[in-house]
Amino acid sequence: MIEDIKKKIRLGLYEYSHHAVDQTIIRLIYEQEICEAIENGIIIEDYPEDKYGPSCLIFGLTKQERPLHIQCSYPIRDLIKIITVYEPDFNLWVNFIERKTK
């Protein structure tokens, strides 16, 4: 699945949700960083029953080693939808890959 997502990103076959656009502005996350993080990313969570359709959470690093989480739809349509993007909180994640338990 991740290879299909990476291919769509390379081909420019993606769009942003309104929420994702807002988050990139607020968090100063650039489109190039999102593409870089997905290119070397891994799927860390799967949301097959997400209310907006099946999606997953990807963790990846930018070329500048900035950790990012990107939630995006599965590549079952022509376009992948980037739902949200953020820099994970180290206090909530183990190595940014596994959620810490309370």
Image (spheres, helix red, strand yellow):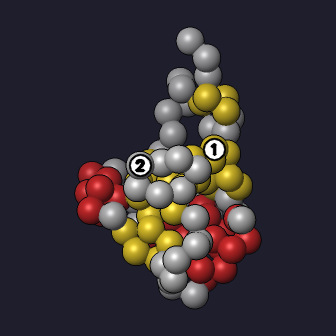
Q: Indicate whether 102 appears above or below 41.
A: above
The answer to which image quadrant residue 99 occupies is: top right
Quadrant location of the N terminus?
bottom right
Q: Position of residue 67 (x, y in %)?
A: 57, 49
Q: Name the image quarter holding residue 9.
A: bottom right
**For this view, does 84 lie left or right of residue 89?**
left
Q: In the rendered view, does 18 fall on the left or right side of 34?
A: left
Under mark 1, the amino acid is Glu
Q: Dot 1, how many residues are within 10 Å of its Cα: few (below 14), some (14-19), or many (20+)?
A: some
Q: Which residue is mark 1?
A: 45
Place of residue 70 in the rendered image (x, y in percent of width and height, measured from the top left) = 51, 55
Q: Give the mark nearest the N terminus, 2 or 1.
A: 1
Residue 32 image position (x, y, % from top left): 49, 72
Q: Which amino acid, mark 2?
A: Lys
In this rendering, the label closer to the viewer, 2 or 1: 2
Q: Taking the image as drawn, is residue 16 in sight? A: yes
SS of the residue at dot 2? loop
Q: Which residue is mark 2?
A: 51
Give the residue at the far bottom of this rendering: 11
Residue at left offset 52%, top offset 77%: 77
Residue 88's label in the rendered image is none
Category of crowding for the residue at label 2, using alpha-carbon neighbours closer than 10 angstroms: few (below 14), some (14–19), many (at least 20)? few
Secondary structure beneath label 1:
strand
Using residue 52 as the reference point, say whether residue 54 is left or right of it: right
Percent of width and height locating residue 15: 40, 74
State the residue at coordinates (47%, 57%): 53
Left or right, 70 with reference to 15: right
